Image (cartoon, rainbow, N blue to C red):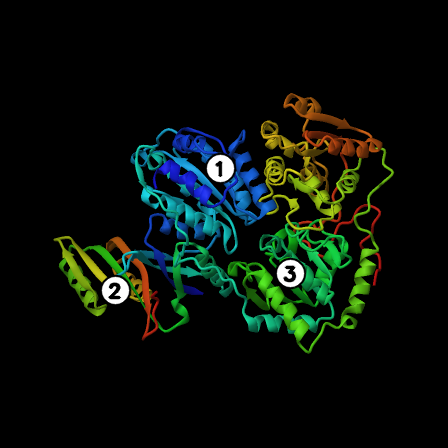
Amino acid sequence: MELSGAEIVIQCLKEEGVEYLFGYPGGAVLHIYDALFQQDAVKHILVRHEQGATHAADGYARATGKPGVVLVTSGPGATNAVTGIATAYMDSIPLVVITGQVPLPVIGSDAFQEVDTVGITRPCVKHNFLVKDVNKLAETMKKAFYIATTGRPGPVVVDIPKDVTDPNRKIPFEYPKTVSLRSYTPVVKGHRWQIKKALDLLLSAKQPMIYSGGGVVLGNAAEALTRFARLLGFPITQTLMGLGAFPSTDPQFVGMLGMHGTYEANMAMHDCDVLIAIGARFDDRVTGKIKEFCPHARIIHIDVDPASISKTVRVDIPIVGEITPILHEMCEMVTTGDVKPDPSLFADWWEQIRQWRSLDCLRYDRNSPLIKPQFVIEQLYEVTGGNAYITSDVGQHQMWAAQFYPFDQPRRWINSGGLGTMGFGLPAALGVKLAFPEADVACITGEASIQMCIQELATLLQYRAPVKIVNLNNGYMGMVRQWQEFIYESRYSHSYLETLPDFQKLAEAYGHVGMQIRNPADVRPALEEALRLRDRTVFMDFITDPTENVYPMIETGKAHNEMRMAPGLSDERELA
Amino acid sequence: MRHIISILIENESGALSRVAGLFSARGYNIESLTVAPTQDESLSRMTLVTLGSDEVIEQITKQLNKLIDVVKLIDITAYEHIQRELMLVKVLSVENAARQEVMRLVDIFRSRIIDVSPTTFVIEVTGEKSKLDAFLGSLEPGSIIEVVRSGVTGVMRGERSLTL
């Protein structure tokens, strides 16, 4: 088969089974767009801004586990995509981003729409390529998909100069069946001796704790984790990125940990004697003050990325490898070995946790005449039966979603945890809805975040991808306002959005259904109505209490046992 | 602690900037960095001298290993090793007595004069960092016009090697 470079790009996507290509055309990719036009296996989704393309592909990847694929032009096309690439990088999401580049002979001449895409993206990709020879194109595409999806996943950029896609130059095409890179061989199998050592330590623990993260979701290890946690009977906490891997409604789950984690999860972290971290990376939002992180614990860490081990917190037993086989091996050792978990060893520990839990740290005022944002999320949980895919933006609403929508399955909770990218939620919801057209997809957002990628409302309509937008509108960049209240003596410097659009009318202008809800009694009916309108995108603008804060909170530099609790809840109460 | 990390890296454009970019992005120190192709021209060998605590060096080696273009690396300071640096120094030397003094120093340091003009010498010195520093310290301070140092390269002793 003889193909041009442009046709090779598309053919490679077909070979990889790519369903959706999120993109935006421009000069440097026009040959590729012409090849795209002449086929219908790969469906192109025309976004309204390249940032939206990367977030949509990212949402698709998070929900499906398959790589998200993006096509943008050179220069501003590539730079607009950078925020989305960095978002995917920080959360280890597999993306293949194809960027057009100016023709080879003019590279370096400050040509029209030229930027050094490989240079700009280098610090926020797993790897990137500049394809200088059409004969290397297929091989490079194969490598890009391989690198993006194996080991610790991540985004890969393939920068293709326009002349490499020249439609008049055809070359024999064969897609490589396999790829091997001498410089890239991800570790897959955990070390058996380390696994045994870890298990011995776990079985001797009196105050054990499981701390699992996004790596469990990415590694499709949710089942293995659930089996492991139940077999041992230990309390388990999950990071923002890990939610759903272990069922949140299971009594063994003590809630999310970290800056806005539950009282019981953070207290248990502080007091545990053995900690097993699984697919988690000891992020600063999780650890709080590093010097006082789990001060009494011996720490086991399972991760596929050796560089994650002992990066910020020194661990005692590292196990590098894929999570599922490691946890399976541990479970096998337990079921076939002589030493069994002895619940009486850690019965007192559970009793302690039950006492911490009885504080009910997520309590909020249910009698307020204003709509409480927590209430909206609780209601959303009920009307969706807890089965919706939830995307979010970044800020208070994101934390409330994590706290008040208990996820029982992995890949249902889709948010930008590492980079904290406002504007992520709406395009991500588009990607999720395309992947799962029959599922309920809701975007929990705020009036500040939603405006950062609001143009994708048009894309939702064009591709008939109806999502439910839950806008928790408190008129402030809520998390900024909260920090200013706590840390800057309520000097609300530029965190108030004085000229908000009428979101109801805005939604209608984009061809969707708009609602504004001001009364707590109207919250549930609005959500029910929105879900009844199955084939429509509904923008629900909930006018919420502008003074509500996210609790508990560990302020920067504080330890896990130094939480700021909601007013009326004392963290000094004698619990033990 | 000062560490010498030897790296085999794909000889591709941009590979060097990946290493340099990693160091600046993560705030690691680079004392010196040398790079050139090896006998296998698909590979370059890089010698990187860096400073850091054991924890930092561990992270540096892990992060370097994570770069897709890095094939193999080793911290040669963890083993018996030899290190060498090449230095070219241009000195101003006009008076006869001063010229005699420079030639004596060259002799003592077992270095070589590789260019002579009526007013200058270019001296080639090879050795460990401390020897090069000592040589510079012995010269008349005002006489040094230029100092060009290659940065450290090194290799492990005996049969231990960094090869594919």
The chain carrying label 3 is A
Category of crowding for the residue at label 3, using alpha-carbon neighbours closer than 10 angstroms: few (below 14), some (14–19), many (at least 20): many
Q: Is residue B53 above or below residue B119?
A: below
Query: Is A17 positioned to the left or the right of A468 in the image?
Result: left
Q: Residue at x 56, y 45 (%)?
A: A61
- How many marks overall? 3
Q: Residue at x 54, y 29 (%)?
A: A48
Pointer 3 and pointer 1 on the same chain: yes
Query: Is A503 positioned to the left or the right of A368 in the image?
Result: left
The chain carrying label 2 is B
Disc 2 or disc 1, which is closer to the eye?
Answer: 1
Q: Which mark is residue B126?
A: 2
Q: Residue at x 31, y 40 (%)?
A: A171
Residue topped by disc 1: A41
Disc 3 or 1, which lies upstream in sequence?
Answer: 1
Q: Can residue B4 be seen in this snapshot?
A: no
Q: Residue at x 66, y 23 (%)?
A: A506
On the image, the x and y values in percent for residue A392 come to 66, 40
Distance between mark 3 and mark 1 Cα atoms: 35 Å
On the image, the x and y values in percent for residue A361 come to 80, 50
Q: Residue furthest right?
A: A367
Residue topped by disc 3: A224
**Displayed quadrant of residue A130:** top left
The chain carrying label 1 is A
Distance between mark 2 and mark 3 Cα atoms: 58 Å
Distance between mark 2 and mark 1 Cα atoms: 63 Å
On the image, the x and y values in percent for residue A125 come to 47, 47
